[in-house]
Amino acid sequence: MKFAVIGAGFYGLHIATRLRALGLEIKVYEKAADILSFASGNNQFRLHLGFHYARNFRTRQQSRDGFYRFLERYGKLTEPIQENYYLVPQGDSLIDFPTYKLIMMSSGLDFIEKEKPEEIKYPCGSVLTAERVLMIDRARKHFYTQLP
Ligand SMILES: Cc1cc2nc3c(=O)[nH]c(=O)nc-3n(C[C@H](O)[C@H](O)[C@H](O)COP(=O)(O)OP(=O)(O)OC[C@H]3O[C@@H](n4cnc5c(N)ncnc54)[C@H](O)[C@@H]3O)c2cc1C
């Protein structure tokens, strides 16, 4: 039996490689000129650990769990971000810095509280985190190899 996957974004390519690994015959259809061109090729490429989502526990859990699952399969396509700060402005934020830290700590997210980078001029609380970044060209090469 033959299967078609419509769309060579990250999801389509992941599904296609997984089905192919099961021995199924897969063809991927992509309307753009290259793979990983739309949302998957036009974002910040950050592997979220959950620091972005102070307002939702479940999203933080999903981010953290997804981060480690992604690394298991695609770790070689990623790099650490040398200085990855999350900043909470003083007085001009829906959340204050002590509350932000408490939320992250209670979700089991590790961070280092650190002075904000020099170029940030406004007063804010600042944490350094160990998120990673997807190297998109490496990802393209990977999927070209996996799905010739
Ligand atoms: C501004 C922005 C920033 C983001 N930042 C991050 C981030 O830092 N970290 C993170 O993890 N996520 C981030 N995301 C989310 C992430 O980009 C998406 O979750 C992910 O890329 C979705 O992948 P996808 O495969 O579903 O979609 P897409 O990458 O959009 O792939 C869909 C593909 O289907 C193709 N297609 C559609 N219709 C057809 C058709 N009829 N025939 C053939 N092909 C078709 C399209 O051309 C496209 O290539 C961000 C999203 C945005 C918009």
Image (cartoon, helix red, strand yellow):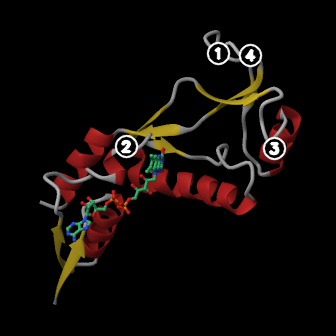
Q: Position of residue 132 (x, y in %)?
A: 50, 38
**Residue pointed to by mark 2:** 76
Q: Mark 1 or mark 3, which has the lower sequence index?
A: 3
Tag 3, which secondary structure?
helix
**Mark 1 or mark 3, which is nearer to you?**
1
Image vertical order of residue 45 relative to residue 112, above or below: below
The residue under the point 49% across, 41% down is: 46
**Residue pointed to by mark 1:** 120
Is 53 situated left or right of 81 in this image?
A: right
Q: Mark 2 or mark 4, which has the lower sequence index?
A: 2
Q: Mark 2 or mark 1, which has the lower sequence index?
A: 2
**Residue pointed to by mark 3:** 105
* Disc 4 to disc 3, C-alpha distance: 18 Å
The residue under the point 32% across, 46% down is: 41
Q: Position of residue 65 (x, y in %)?
A: 60, 58
| Type of amino acid under label 1 | Ile
Image vertical order of residue 121 relative to residue 144, above or below: above
Image vertical order of residue 79 relative to residue 73, above or below: above
Which one is nearer the viewer's eye here, 83 or 44? 44
| Type of amino acid under label 3 | Met
Q: Quadrant of the N terminus?
A: bottom left
**Residue pointed to by mark 4:** 115
**Mark 2 or mark 4, which is nearer to you?**
4
* Disc 2 to disc 4, C-alpha distance: 31 Å
* Disc 1 to disc 4, C-alpha distance: 10 Å
